[in-house]
Amino acid sequence: MNESLERLKEEVAGRLSRSVSEAEVEQLRVEYLGRKGTVTGLLRGLKDVAPEERPQRGEELNRLRAFIEERIAGCLESLKAEKRSKALTEERVDITLPGSRRERGRVHPLTMVVDEIVDVFSAMGFEIARGPDIEDDYHNFEALNMPKDHPARDMQDTFFVAAERLLRTHTSPVQIHVMESRKPPLQIIVPGAVYRHDDDATHSPMFHQVEGFMVDRGIAFTDLKGVLTHVLRQIFSADARVRFRPSFFPFTEPSAEVDIGCVICDGKGALRDSHACRVCKGTGWLEILGSGMIDPEVFRFVGYDAEKFSGFAFGMGVERIAMLKYGVEDIRLFFQNDLRFLRQFPSF
Amino acid sequence: MKLTLNWLKEFVDLRDAPEKLAETLTMAGLEVESLAPARAPDGSEDWIFELAVTPNRGDCLGVIGIAREIAALKAGRMKAPARKPAVQKANANAPVKVEIQSPRACQRYSAQAVESIRLRPSPDWLRFRLEAAGIRAINNVVDITNYVMVETAQPLHAFDLERLDAKRIVVRQAKEIATFVTLDEVERRLAPEDLLICDGDVPVALAGVMGGRDSEVHQGTTAVLLESARFDPATVRRTAKRLGLHSEASHRFERGVDPEGTVAALERAVALLQEIAGGNTFGGIIDRYPRPPAPAAIAVRHARVSEIVGVDIKPAEIEKNLKALGCKVQATKAALKVTPPTYRGDLTREADLIEELARVHGYDKIPSTLPRALLSGKPDARLRADRGVRSYLVGEGLVEAIHLPFTSADINRRFPGLLAGEKPVAILNPLVQESAEMRLSLVPGLIEDLKVNLAQRAEGFAAFALNKVFYLDTKDEPAERYHLAALLYGRRGRRGLRAEEAPFGFLDAKGLVEGILDGRGGEWSWNAADPPAFLHPGRAARLAAGRAELGYVGEIHPDLAEELSLGRCLTFELDFGKLLQYLSPELAVRSLPRFPSVERDLAMVVDDAFPAQRIIDWIKDLRNVLIEKVEVFDQYRGASIPEGKKSLAFSISYRAQDRTLTDTEVQTVHQELVARLGEVFGAQLRG
Ligand SMILES: [Zn+2]
């Protein structure tokens, strides 16, 4: 290549390497390769070159042009990459800023607990049944072996809406409704609101229960123990200690109160500071549900043959379980619907 | 029931320390609620037990009953009964005659006269035990009756003998006797079936419930007639409950006292009166016991015990444990013939005895089993719907609220629910007058919540409730409906950097309802006529499916909002139970269209009150097969629009099932539609 072309090549390379913008590079392209550009001019001048020199001169100029084009392309690419990388740096967000969203709502904690209990029983094949909140005396008491003037009625102070109509004091009347209309085998749970004439930090005039019962041939007290132990370990923890102790309900015989090892003091009855645990009153146990084998008298009321069928029934307080699971101390918090309380629970 | 350990020890030699004994009792159904050390007046160590006695165990409302229970549980051994005072049977000299006129209400009446009593405070040891049992000490005579009651579970009553003028005790129903002044100086109105103890014709006590003012032991008393009776539990309970006179005595009578125990209790009281009050009996024990119950034997089958309990309790153990409980047991081929002791009136059936056997065997020694699976469970449609709608509303930012269902008559008048004119259910014995009715609507509860939260400086509020409302049906019977309601106030909550949200408006509330109905099929209609009175008349609508009223949506009436000191609140309330019936159970998915659609917009200027839906309905009624969808997408009032008018913008989507529509084809149909809309509605159009 002749010396002047060699110089030209170096000049272009030098200028391209110093250019800092796409516009500058574009300018150089016009200056050398444009219609009036230097290289274009040289190519155009080929016709004046002696014919024997023309092929070589032509090839040299074409190589020069290819060289410049390649350099320009490379230069543009690196400028673009530089620009993108600069942009990537500048566009960096502060990922510690809070996400932007509409506030989600919350399902009520009592609903969460009922759902959890229902799911445990559903997985065992129990069906849901429901009944009216306003009951008659027959279903709420009489057919559950609590005749008028029975002292057991004292355990359930009652709201009346008419002489024989009342707000159910427990979900047990649904046992009667179901057994009146269906034959065994039955395994049913009944979530619902119940009412007692009572109002303080641990009692609300309305609260929720989940009732359940199972009736078939050959159901025994050992089955009651097995099913309820399984259920409580699902609801609380797989290694929860469960104890059954005798009690009295007019509609079950034998009857059992079921306790779990205290979830607050871990069943020790005392806290780490050696003060007695307030939640279990130092006993290490928490009463969690009432249960028993369905009394033959109840079967007589619904027309079942107690010699053929047997079954167990149980009832648990939803608020009590929620209070223990979440460490809520005042039952009234569940019904004040203070967002500061409700928003402490997860949204699903 | 409270008692001291040393008192118990008079009747039973205990095997264990107090804590262990408490554990044994709790695990046998006599729950020990508290156990506290105490010091007796003589300086000796004692313990106070508090027991929760279930209503079936009247026998355990006495120290002796608990001692027997401890022995039956093999946690101690009964001591031989202490000295028996020499009491003669009644003789001709008995100072008082007794006549039972109502033998059904009074199965036994025993009495003993005691004279030369010196009335004074009781000795310290007696006061200590009585007070440990939760009973206030008064004077030695009254204290002794109470002491014997706590010891034997048999209530006693002492009449001042000198104040019994007729000296003739008559146990009878009140019938024509209308009032009686009890010893608390309150004149009580009697019911004809109340059981009275009369002195001749004059009532001196409400049997088993409370004595009378005029026969009470008082400062000058020197002679008493002690009463030890067995009254019918239901009779005592009815009277005590009606008059609100619950006492230690009525509590025990209601749970049934041992008809065979009246005399022993009298003897114990006499011994104490002699020891402490210097009394002397005269005239021997008077005892009326018209029809002693014939104890009926109960058949207990070994096989049945195993069947119910689920473990094989051996016949020998059954027999031994029943005997330990005081039963007489006679073995026959088929079953054991068991006669429970008279103090266990709760044991009348085989089932009762099976419970006793399981209890004494120990629940903790009975294994756990899982029953053979019943594979008949069904999913619950209501549960699915509840969960679905909850999760939708939670996603929309609403918080679920749960309320007590009680409200006031006033609130029910203002918020009468979905159907005006329904009567509320009233509570006969409300806790307070402000909660004397059952709610007709879920909305007032949500408004209460809003106030609670505004007081806590909440900026916006969006909540829903899914619960029952109550009303009287056409036959005036209480009935229930399952409602879903929501309340929106202020602005939607946001998280993140501050950004403006528009305040909640009518369309937000309506939109939530539409979201519930979305994709559910069914024919819904919104109607602005006759909105509920508590809603803004211009910002309210009713939702119906055919003739069925399903709910309403709207803004709380500004007058009402002002009265409640609230700003603008939006609400909806649906009869969710009914709504579920109208939701199509089956979904059919259409195949996706094969040819593209063409969208055209049109805007019309109409009167301000003109409802957009009329245009949509009119276009749909054309049933033009090329018109696939009509939607309103904008409403505008302002500069370019004359006063009293608004501009509505619609988007119309054209599509053919069998070909791609050409521009000219669409243009022709659309122009024709625009022209006809102009003719029909006389509106200015831009198409
Ligand atoms: Zn504890």
Image (spheres, coloured by chain):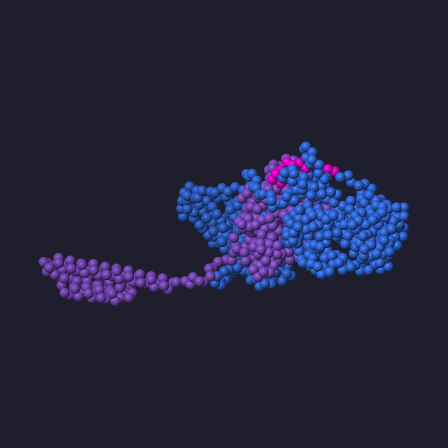
Chain colours: A purple, B blue
Using the rendered image of the protein, determine whether residue B440 is visible from the camera's viewpoint.
no
> In this view of the protein, which residue sits in the foreground, B241 or B464?
B241
Left or right of B330: which side holds B585? Answer: left
Residue A325 coordinates in the image, percent (x, y):
56, 54
In the picture as drawn, the residue positioned furthest to the top comes out as B333
Q: Is residue A341 left or right of residue B471?
A: left
Is residue A25 shown above or below B351?
below
Q: How many marks?
A: 0
Residue B28 x/y as whole percent: 65, 47
Residue A210, relative to residue B308: is it above or below? below
- The residue stretch that appears in magenta: B296-312
Q: Residue at x 60, y 43 (%)?
A: B366
Q: Nearer the viewer, residue A241 or B425?
A: A241
A116 shown above or below A74 = above
Tell me, yes or no, whether the highlighted magenta stretch contains residue B297.
yes
Could you say which quadrant of the image residue B35 lies in? bottom right
Residue B494 in sight here: yes
Q: Residue at x 24, y 62 (%)?
A: A29
x and y, in percent, of residue A107 in the image? 55, 53
Give the residue drawn at x 69%, y 57%. Answer: B46
Verify whether residue B524 appears in magenta: no
x then y, percent, for residue B473: 68, 46
| Viewer-closest of B178 and B616 | B178
Query: Looking at the rendering, which quadrant does residue A345 occupy?
Result: bottom right
Compared with B500, B316 (above or below) is above
Task: Left or right? Give the position of B242 relative to A182.
Answer: right
- B282 sits to left or right of B498: right
For the point 64% across and 52% down, which residue is it? B20
